[in-house]
Image (tube, grey):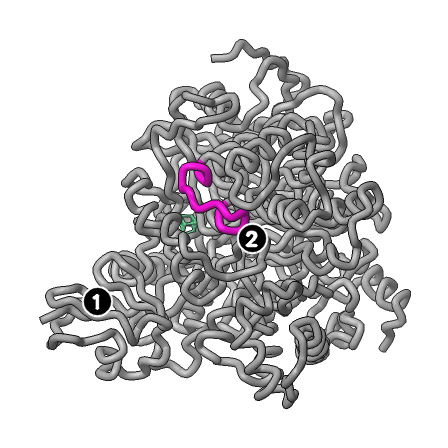
Amino acid sequence: MIKVNGKKHSWYEGMTIKDLLKDVNNSHLYAVVRINEKHISRPYFEKTLVPDNSEVFLIPMIAGG
Amino acid sequence: MAEYKMESLKTFNYDRPVIEKGYANQTLCIDISDGVISIKPVTEKMKNVFIGGKGFDLWLLWNAVNSTTKWNDPENAICIASGPMGGTPVYPGSGKSIVTTISPLTGSVIDSNVGGYFGPYLKFSGFDALEVTGKTSKDVVIFIDGIDEKVQIFKASGLPDDSYTLSAILTERFAKGKPRNISVVSTGPGAKNTRMGCLNFTWYDLKRKRARYKQAGRGGIGGVFADKGIKAIVARWDTVTSKTNNPANANTLKEVGRKHSREVVELDPKQNQMAQIGTTHLVPIMNDFDLLPTHNFQYGQHSEADNIGQEVFRRIFDPGYDGCWIGCTLACSHGVKDFVPLTGPYKGIKVFVDGPEYETIAGCGSNLGIFDPHTIIEMNFYCDTYGLDTISVGTSTAFAMECFEMGLINETHTHGMNLSFGNRSAALEVVHQMARGEGFGQIIGRGVREMKTIFSRDYGADPDLMQDIGMEAKGLEFSEYMTKESLAQQGGYGLALKGPQHDEAWLIFLDMVHNFMPTFEQKAEALHWFPMFRTWFGLCGLCKLPWNDVVPEDNKDTQEPAKVMKHVEWYADYYTSVTGRQTTADGLIRMSEAVYNFQRIFNLKMGFGQREHDNIPYRAVGPVKTVEYESRAERYDKQLVEKHNVDITGKTTEEKIALLREFREKLYEKLKDAVYKRRGWTNNGIPTVETVKRLGIDFPEVLELLRAHGVES
Ligand code: SF4
């Protein structure tokens, strides 16, 4: 089990960020995701595994300086 | 503590007006040549057309200077203003000041947005804006005391030169036991000896019991300040409550302020965590998307970038509340406690460092090939205390380093300094030399534009090559984002009024990552709406970060997520609740349009503000050197083939660079056409008579200026 934006979400072995985003509406708007304290950007969504029990935050937009 | 003396030269008593709906309705003018202090009224017309903040500054500056005024002429004014909402403690990000002057780097108008308590304290002391003109050979301190209703000019001697200690001394000197009542504006020795001096604006950190500061960094405003002979300007004001700004509708203000504050508190921890890590989250993200400038904007990525990213600064920053204005719940102005510099006058002494923010990390770090947080923090500390802009220091040093590595300059010119990328001690030495006005640091301190002239004239360096790799436009050094793959951001930088600073339009992600604006018309629309809305913050005394660095959870399902319209509508309500002037989201854009176009025309008055001045170096558009092309060959080859229908078989890298350049430069010119059209400008980038009439800025002097440039109705 993981938490996504504060809500419980199911987890399975081998789940990547790309897999997780399949369950999210308008997921193309997310270019960055934070897993616990680490930011992962879209180029790495496919190869980054989501660990069990992690807290995932979908960062809505990067707005710059 | 240093022995110093302050002798009062002039005291001006005044009756402090009651603040009405966010306005003091008067401005303070000080001519320090002869110590004349006067008060000018703020007219209804000024409020209608210029709103406040940067708008008031520009109007005062316009009237102070003529078309031939240079940055160091006595008539050049330094104008500082907050805005009608500036000083509100119940709405996040409401304590900003805007500073304008004629810049030593650009020769035209510069504006810089800064935190700290000065702007609000100035207004509550009775002045919507401050205008300082003249020059003096004495070191003077100006004291604006809103509590005792007097303005004083002191002749100072024995005060330290550097801003860090000076801010602390002057805070104590004027505090009368309440240091939170004081805000000090000052600069340091670097401002005297370079063209890239900044101003430090203090806010008092009650928990840490020290004066902290934020920087009005861009365009060398600190140099104008130092050249005038001003050591510091100090404002004193009392406790601030939601009533101090006397809003038109306190209940609506409280309600909208509470909504935005609560949202920030709830969502920032789930989103960018700026209350913990400031803007350092941008470092790894920019790096992942090939947007983090490294080695003078040659590349956008480096394998060591994680060493200077948020994971490291999360551990380094001193935890605690870091709001640069009272009540800001985003509180992103972090600092490093007990930092011990390894070089310079503070070597071995524990200091508190305000920062670093993303721009400093990229400018004084990755862009110089430096991936060591300690060096970056030390550069940050010395730039601030010496009164130097970390962005111009970073971008200028990066340019010098690339010239050194390419052999355009050598150790004979650098006085034996090895200026290779990644040389940390050389980078720090450059900063110390800038402060002392010595050695090659002094040359770098003149900025990229002047370095290009000096290197070609005196050292025989290739001017065309330097034109391509020297990252300045309009004389201002680029801030720290890579724009090669975002045409919209090339426009965001190139078409910015003051020069390439991201505060006007930051469109890289929307354009490149989210692909929100695939057509020219959409890019032009974005290059209209975003600069206008961002300008509005500077009219009102606000910080833009709470607008779109925290966004509502349902924002992505709205029609235009990039605009965060829910917040824009809150800002319209906020404006109405303070000023009593009804407005809407569109009304905010209309307010900015008038000031924005006026600033463009101000550039015209100073000899700039036309199409040719919106050019940018090719490094901002595409790969200049073969190594740059080859490092991303797959991307560029694909573009040539798929986007531009080129058969690249058998072509050399040089040939492909030339072809790509031709395509990309054409696109940039096409973008200019589209944006000028959208903004209501001529094809030469000048606002039309119809535009200035529509915006109510058709003053006789404006129409005369347009006529002189062939723009008539
Ligand atoms: S968000 Fe940061 S920069 Fe803006 S007002 Fe708040 S503390 Fe200052």
Residue B668 visible, this orientation? no
Circle 2 — which element? loop
- Which residue is found at the position 55% from the left and 73% from the top? B633
Near-viewer residue (B294 or B509): B294
User: Which of the two marks, 2 or 1, is nearer to us in this view?
Assistant: 2
When the figure is inspected, residue B197 is found, relative to residue B282, above or below; the finding is above
Note whether ligand 1 is within 8 Å of mark 2: no
Q: Position of residue B24 (x, y in %)?
A: 56, 45
Is residue B443 found left or right of B383 in the rendered image? right
Ligand 1 within 8 Å of the CB at mark 1: no
Q: Quadrant of residue B683?
A: bottom right
The residue singled out by tag 2 in the image is B295
Q: Let me know if residue B370 is in the magenta part.
A: yes
Expressed as whole percent of the image width and height from the top left, the position of residue B97 reads 54, 46
For label 1, the residue is A56
- The amino acid type of the residue labelled 2 equals His
Residue in view at x 54 percent, y 38 percent = B122
Q: Specify the subunit that label 1 lies on.
A: A
> Is residue B393 left or right of B562 when viewed as pictured?
right
Task: In the rendered view, tell whether residue B314 sits above or below residue B349.
Answer: below
* The magenta stretch spans residue B98: no
Q: What stretch is highlighted in magenta?
A: B365-377
Q: Which residue extends farthest left?
A: A1
Secondary structure found at label 1: strand
What chain does mark 2 sit on?
B
Q: Residue B454 location in percent, x, y? A: 79, 43
Q: Quadrant of residue B439?
A: top right
Q: Distance between the residues labelled 2 and 1?
A: 34 Å
Residue under the point 44% across and 47% down: B357
Question: At label 1, which amino acid type do we have?
Answer: Val
